[in-house]
Image (cartoon, grey):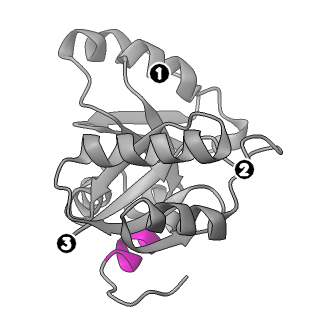
Amino acid sequence: MNTYIALLRGINVGGHKKVPMAELRELLTKSGFENVRTYIQSGNIILQSSLSDKIAIESKIQKAINTHFGFEVPVIAKTRKELKFIFDTCPFSDEKKENSYFIMLSDSPKSDVLNEVSDITFKNEEFVIIKDCLYFYSSAGYGKSKFNMNSFEKKLDVKATARNYKTMVKLIAMSSKKEKDH
């Protein structure tokens, strides 16, 4: 069995796309995943599967959610090793890292679009793209930033979903556990 961290985008935000975590765990278990666990309400899932293709896992989760809940949700699946690499590769100082966001991308952007977005700057904000992650830091905080993830998604031609430092730490820790805690 392979362990994956599946990251859903845009659920349970402002009363839209409601997905109760207990119902999601049950749905994914019935869909053939094992040891399904979730963390907070924003779509962080740790699960095990005999599938070794992340795209197949993403597709299976998307299809199950669409069939059961009636709406599409972008899903990005990572192995624990990939998530740990993303976390450990953060280019910011420890102080900034603890207040930064890790924006997982569905693919590594092509070099021509990377060059295009590299010129984008906002006061008191920094971003660095390394492989399939955009690292973002704002001294004013994410909620007050000028950064717009939807805009970057379109420019980079990828799907993306953001997680903060504390969530990354928790997901890495949870993905190394073997027990079935919810």
Under circle 3, the secondary element is loop
Location of residue 81 (image quadrant): bottom left
Residue 135 lies in what quarter of the image?
Answer: top left
Q: Nearer the viewer, residue 150 or 118?
A: 150
Q: How busy is the neighbourhood of tag 2: few (under 14 within 10 Å), some, or many (20 plus)?
A: some
Q: Earlier in the sequence, mark 1 or mark 3?
A: 3
Q: Main secondary structure of the magenta part?
A: helix
Q: Is residue 27 above or below residue 70?
A: below
Q: Amino acid at mark 1?
A: Phe
The amino acid beneath tag 2 is Asn
Q: Give the residue at x 29% y 12%.
A: 113
Q: Which residue position is annotated with label 1?
A: 152
> Which quarter of the figure has residue 2?
bottom left
User: In front of the other: label 2 or label 3?
Assistant: 3
Q: Pointer 3: what residue?
A: 1
Instruction: Please name the residue that numbered disc 2 is placed on.
Output: 12
- Whether 161 is drawn above or below 146: the answer is below
Label 2 – label 3 distance at C-alpha: 29 Å
State yes or no: discs 2 and 3 in contact (Cβ < 8 Å).
no
Give the residue type that dot 3 points to. Met
Q: Secondary structure at mark 2?
A: loop
